[in-house]
Image (spheres, rainbow, N blue to C red):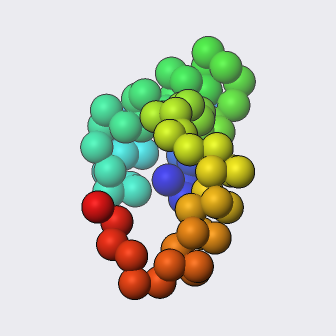
Amino acid sequence: MLYRGRIIGKLEEGRSVTSVAAEFGIAHSIVSRLWRQFQTTGTAIRGFSSGRPRGTTPADDRYIVLQARRNRRQTAG
């Protein structure tokens, strides 16, 4: 979200969550969640999730590319 800082600023000025959501054209729940996160953590930066673990190591990736270049006509199967 591009406006996190501006949204937090308006909320700190005393504006209501509903009016800020209407001004930015986003859902009330998004502004409310962002405000709650800011009050809890003190920051509006998006958290990062670990996601799915990689299936190959960087060394495996290099080997796969090397093999693909050596055997250009070989299929994946």
Q: Residue at position x 69%, y 31% from top?
A: 43
Q: Quadrant of residue 17?
A: top left
Q: Is residue 41 above or below residue 71?
A: above
Q: Does residue 43 appear in the picture of this structure?
A: yes
| 63 left or right, relative to 49 | right
Residue 9 position (above or below residue 1)? above
Residue 58 location (% of width, % of height): 69, 50
Residue in the foreground of this view, choosing between 58 and 69: 69
Task: Give residue 12's position: percent from left, percent from top.
Answer: 62, 33
Q: Which residue is more in the foreground, 53 or 72?
A: 72
Residue 32 lies left or right of residue 35; in this view the side is left
Q: How many marks?
A: 0
Q: In which quarter of the image is the C terminus?
A: bottom left
Residue situated furthest bottom in the rendering: 73
Vertical order, 54 against 6 (above or below): above
Q: Which residue lies at the image location 67% right of the left edge and 61% below the top edge?
A: 62
Residue 36: x percent and y percent?
51, 21
Residue pictured at 58% horizontal, 79% vertical:
70
- Looking at the image, the residue that sits furthest to the top is 40
The reply to whether residue 10 is in sight is no
Towards the viewer: 66 or 20: 66
Residue at 42% over, 45% down: 20
Q: Residue 40 in the image: x percent, y percent? A: 61, 15
